[in-house]
Structures are given as C-alpha cells and as structure tokens.
Image: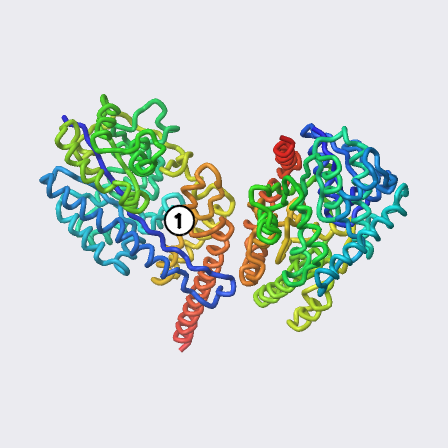
Amino acid sequence: MRVLMFGWEFPPHIAGGLGTACYGIVKGLAYNGVETIFVMPSASGDEDGSVAKIINASDVAVDTVSETVDDFLDKVRFVHIGSNMIPYADPEEFSSIVEDERKRQVKDFRISYGQKFKFSGKYGANLLEEVARYAMVGGTIALQHKDEFDVIHAHDWLTYYAGIAAHELTGKPLVVHVHATSFDRGSADNIDTRVFAIEKRGMAAADKVVAVSDLTRNICINKYGVPPEKVVTVHNAVDFSGRENLVVERGVKEKVVTFLGRITFQKGPEYFIEAAAKVLKRTKNVRFVMAGSGDMMNRAIRQVARLGISDRFHFTGFLRGADVQKMFALSDVYIMPSVSEPFGISPLEAMRTGVPSIISHQSGAAEVLKYAFKVDFWDVDAMANDIYALLNYPALASFAAKEGYDEVNDLKWNGATAKLKKVYESVIG
Amino acid sequence: MKKSICLYFQVHQPTRLRQYRFFDIGKDSHYYDDFANRSILRRIATKCYLPMNQLLLSQIEKSGGKFKVAFSISGSAMDQFERYAPDVVDSFRALAATGCVEFLAETYYHSLASLASPSEFEHQVLKHKAAVERLFGVTPKAFRNTELIYSNDIGKAVGKLGFKTMLTEGARHIMGWRSPNFIYSGETARSMKLLLRNAPLSDDIAFRFSNRSWEGWPLTADKYLGWIKEGLKDDDILNLFMDYETFGEHQSADSGIFDFMAALPGAVIADGTFEFVTPSEAASKHKSVSSLDVPDAISWADEERDLSAWLGNELQQEAYNKVYAMTEKLSIVNDEELWADFGHLQESDHFYYMCTKFFSDGEVHKYFNPYDTPYEAFINYMNVLSDFQIRLDEKRAALDVKEQVVKEQKAVKKKK
C-alpha cells in the first residue's frame, strides 16, 4: 500500500508537535508495510529520507500534467487567496464579488503558472496564502505521481486544501487527520472563522476523518457536523527510541511541581496557580514552576503575586531543546491542567522521565494513560489533593513513576499506525 | 448416610469513607460517608436482606426444620443494621430462633488482622463473638475468616481461640487432584476441621445465574439438583458459600433467583440424596479424609485465589503497613473512639479499592468500588490515616504529659 501524505513540517526543523507526530506516523507506517510519499512546503534536505520519499513543494512548479488549464482551475477554484469575509452583501452584489474573485484568481494563476513558489513553511502572517498556494502545488504533485499512491492523507487544516486538490484531480480517496481544531486554539466564541471554514471543508471532502482522541472525535462530530461513522479515533503515540534520561543535579531541596507549555487560556495555567496556593497553605516543602510563555503569562505572574506565593512559584520563560528535558528531570510532579487538549504529548514525556503526572480529563491523553492522575481542569481542590498526596506519600509517587514509565514505553506508533492502515484499507475499497 | 449440602452466606457492608481531602487533615475527624452507607444499606435491605430472610424463614418452617443455612455477618454490617435498619436485625433474630441457622464467627471489621497482628486478630474475633451473642442470642462455634482467607498459621491461631471448624476456599492450586467435596483437617492444627467451598457450583448461583449467554441458563432447581447429584457421586459434602447479596442485589429479583431458592430446598429434600447441614453439624457428621497443607494464604477472591486483591501492589502494601504499624501505640493510648476508627480503617474493602488488577477481574472490582481509580482510593485513605495518626500522636503525647505530672507530684511529696 502507498500513501501520498501532505504535512507542514518534518524533523529536524520543527516548530510544533505536528512534525514530530508525522515522523512517528511515517516510521510506523513503514513498519506496517505502507510506503509514504511525504510532501512538505519547505524541506531543507536533511530530513530522514529513509522512512519516506520527501517532496519539497518549493521545488515544484505549478503546471498541468494531463488536464487543461481550465479544468485544473475549475477543480482548485475553491482556493481563495486572501480574505473572503463579506458580511452584508445582497445576492447580486455577492455574485459580482464572486465573479471578480474568480477573475482575480484566474489572473493570479496565469501569473504563477509555470512558476515555483518559495514557501516559508512556517506559521507566519501570510499563512493563508501559503495554504492556498500549497494546494495548487499539491494538486500538481498528485498528478505527477498519480500512479505511485493509493490514498491521500492530509494533516491538519494547513494541508487540507492540498489534500482536497489532490483528491479532486486524481480521484484517489482522501483521509484527513485532525491533530487539533479551531476550538482548541481559541475559546468557543472566539475562533478564527477562516480556519474553521477550511477545517470543515476538509472534513466534508474526506472519505474518512482520523481524530487523535475521542475528545477530538466528538468535536468533529458536534462542531463540524461530520457523521460519526466517518470519524475514527487513532490515539497518538510517542517515539522514545534512543532516548537516555538525563541525570541532573538539583539546586533546591524542596520538591518541584511543574507546568510546561504555552501559557494560554487552553492550557489552564490559572487553575494550576490556584492549586499551588492551596498546597502551599499546608506544606512548605515544595516549589512550583511554570515553564513556557504565552499571552496569559503576565496575568499569571500577577495572579501569583496577588496570592502571595511568589517566593515559591517560579517562571522560567520559554524553554527549548535540552532545557525541556532538564526541566522534566528536575521535577517531582508534572501537571497539565488543560481546558481543551486534543491529545497532549507532554505528560508522556514527563512519565518517560519517571515523573508522575496529573492531567485533566479534558485532554485526549487521559483516554490512554491509566497511570496518570486525572482531574477536571476546574477542580482545583482535587488537583491540590493529588499534588499533596504525591509529595507526601512516597509509595504513591514511586508506584506512579514506575508504572507510568512502563506504560508510556508501550505506547508505540507501530500499533497506532496499524489502525491507520485499516482506515486506509476501508477507503481504498 | 445421606450426603450433605452446607449453605453459608456472607453478609458484609463496608464503612465507606467520605471524600477526605488533605485540607481536612487535622481539622475534621469524621471519616465516613454516612449518606452513601445509609442509602446503600437501605437499598440492599429492601432488595435482599428482608425478602431473602423471609424466604429462608418460610422454607425452614415448611421443611419442618430440615432446611438449614449458616450466616457470617461482619461487625461493620451489624453496626449499620443497628443504626439504619433495625428491621433487618429483627429478621435475623427470627431466623436464629428457629435453631436451623448457624451464625459464624469472623473478625469484627472484616479485616486482614489475621495476617498482620495476632493480638488485634484475637481482639476482633472476641468482639465479634460478643456482638453476635448480644444481637442474635447465639454463640458462634465455627469460624470463617475475612474473604475465606486461610493458611496453616491462621488455622492454628483460630484453633487457639477455641474454634474446631473453619471455612475456606477449595483453591485449585492447593487441592490439585483432590476434591473440595470432603472434610479436611488443618496441617498444623489437626483437630481443626476444614470445609471447602465448591467454586464452580457456588458460582453457578452467585455469578452465572442470570447470564443469558451461559449454557446453563435458565437454571432451575431440578436442573441444579441433577448437576450436584452427578458431580458428587462419590463425594460427601457440597459447600455452597457465597455473598448473601447474591439474592436480589447481584442477581436481581426478576432473574428468578428468589423462585429458584424457594424451589431448591423442597427439591433436595424430596429427592433424598442430600440433607442440609450447618457447618458445625457437617464437621461432626463427616470424618476428615486428610490434612491440607496451606503454607501461603489462600482466599476466595479473583482468579488467583490469593491475597493479591488486597495486598497485590505497593499502594496496598503501604497502606496496610501504615495502619497496622499503629497497633502498639494504640494499645498504650487505649482510647475507645480511636479503637473504633482504627477498626473501620482496617476493613479489607479499603485495600480492595486500591487494587490495580484492571483487566482479568476488573469487572468484579469495578462493581464493588466507589472510586474511579486506585489512586483516588489510596489518596483518600492515606489522608484519613494521616488525620488518625495526628490524633493518635496527640493522645500519646498527652499521656506522657500526664505521667510526667504524676511523677513530679510524687517527687514533690517525697521531698516534703
């Protein structure tokens, strides 16, 4: 079986977790006998080509291999470059706007026809334009390699248009993979409607939708209107091969409880701070660390000051690379109180380091981790209670560390991708 | 000589702990979920204890005293009956008055004291015996340990307390080729007679009765009688041991379990191959065929039939060690309120809730467990125990101060 996969990034150059997940998936698929052509907007050449054939979209000129220009355009017409928010237009006005837009697109296409486009492959200001261009190039790549794959697989909204273009032009089945949704990025009444529209379109066009957790699956069904039978949960895994745990020297004698992630609404930083204050009322032998940065950081610092616990609550700012590993190694308890988390890899990292983890029921990881402690994100009393117990009952901490370590080592991509292969088989028919 | 059927029912209700957060430690020393304990007890009284007691009573009367059963009622359950369901006490008393019902001795708190502390074990057995005498007017002569836990050492300790008959599990890894359908004797205490549970035939009633995908379904008294006659062709005694809550609670009334139990005594008596006996009657009626060597403790729980349901993981062992480590200090302090809490904290159920055997026996464990996870069970228990430890330490310290004052007063007197 062969798959044409559209991603946005791939190790070693990654900004988010998507690249790491794609690498694990591609490797796991290879183990399960599935060959992958992996398309990404901007490859550097040092990607691991042993697990997949990597195609750099920046190297490919938009052209039509077998279709006429009009036909090609007809199929990728939905690609709107730029904003298309038209609030109060009457029908006549609307159709004229649409016609203008179409003409502009044709013109735009004629200009870019035969040209290469240098993608940044990042998450910059012209992201939507890159997404649209990626679709054009993606369609071209799909036509060029038409006989080399059986199924198309697109990861997250950035690649959905590319997936749809490939699907429309080749007629091969499409699987879209939902790693996160707009509802995990903003609060329910504050989502990016343009991104939402792309997500909805991708899920509608797909033959099967893969969600990283039941939590995300429910969002696909309830918020995007995908029929339940079309969405399959394939839980994320993690690749720890070759990982050695760091040995670090500790500077403080107190126990350390750590939050590590973006300091944003979705990650629930304020609940962690409240729980910390409750624990500190009863025991002094502990320090709390909030590692990361984000738009709620200043608010978090103020909250800590207001509660009068600044001497025991520390902010590290954004951590990268080895510092992340070091932070885990320095911790006694890890906490992820996310309000909404499609999956959440960080507790797996912590448990791999032998750190007992408390995670919210509102995270996808809670569906697979038996040996993590689970609380509702808003239940700061329960959170504080678990933290206190892990600090004060050594048998509990050592049991959770040992069992957790074994558990996360067993969560392998080979198993997850075997499920994915079944999904492919179901759409190839 | 007729073959024997010995029916014994276990009656126990745990004293469930309330949600006890670390904020409460040192501040609030009420540990129990009174609402849950009361409402669960009332529900089971209505669905099981009252109707089943009534059924047994009428069967005994109808049989002219030929139908006999035995009960073991834990002290924790008796406490709850007295507090929440005195009508249940009355109905057990009526059964006791027939003379056809034997009441067994056990540890008052349905505890693991037999494994942990000889003195605590003796204390609880005697306390239980006294409570049975007070409530039901009969003196227990036969013994059954918590969850049928038994070993050579336990047999010896029980013998020392004056019991000559004991009930346990016919665990396959102990029995090997031998049949549980005979009376055995203890390895070190040869005068102790052992009655062994027949697991498959007990579980046909207790676990499988309402299972429609079971090939034996629907089970009728005649069908069952056919099985036991076939199964015990060359054997002496059939020991059917099960939780009393089987009737009406685990197997609901509409499964037909009550009809089955109303038909069974008559069918057995009319057939004439078997007669009903109580455990003590069985022990004097049948000779022991051989001794049974049980170096490591067995029980009737789970597939393993060992202690792993209560002491299988580090959390359970830690909690168990911590609570029993207090025994000595407690006997010095000797405070009634602390003794009572100490007893309830020993109930084996608390350790059962911390079990991490999720898979093989997970279903059974889940059914009996008020906690979502073993972690919650452990944390809640340890929080309660932390508070208990503080109270114990405070009382102990107060005692020291008192002794010190007495000493000083004596010293002052001498000087004078």
Percent x, y of residue B279: 22, 37
Location of residue A283 (image quadrant):
bottom right
Asked whether, in this view, residue A59 is left or right of residue B107, the answer is right
Determine the residue positioned at 82% across, 57% down. Answer: A125
Along the viewing direction, whichever of B138 and B114 lies nearer the viewer: B138
Along the viewing direction, whichever of B356 and A25 lies nearer the viewer: A25
The residue most toward the left is B64
Q: Which residue is mark 1?
A: B349
Quadrant of the snapshot with the C terminus of chain B = bottom left
Determine the residue positioned at 20% across, 41% down. Answer: B69
Q: Is residue B270 above or below residue B55?
A: above
Q: Residues within 10 Å of mark 1 (few under 14, many from 20)?
A: many
Q: Is residue B172 above or below residue B106?
A: above
Location of residue B338 (image quadrant):
bottom left
Quadrant of the snapshot with the N terminus of chain B = top left
Q: Amino acid at mark 1?
A: Asp
Q: Secondary structure at mark 1?
A: helix
Asked whether, in this view, residue B33 is left or right of residue A372, the answer is left
Percent x, y of residue B292: 32, 29
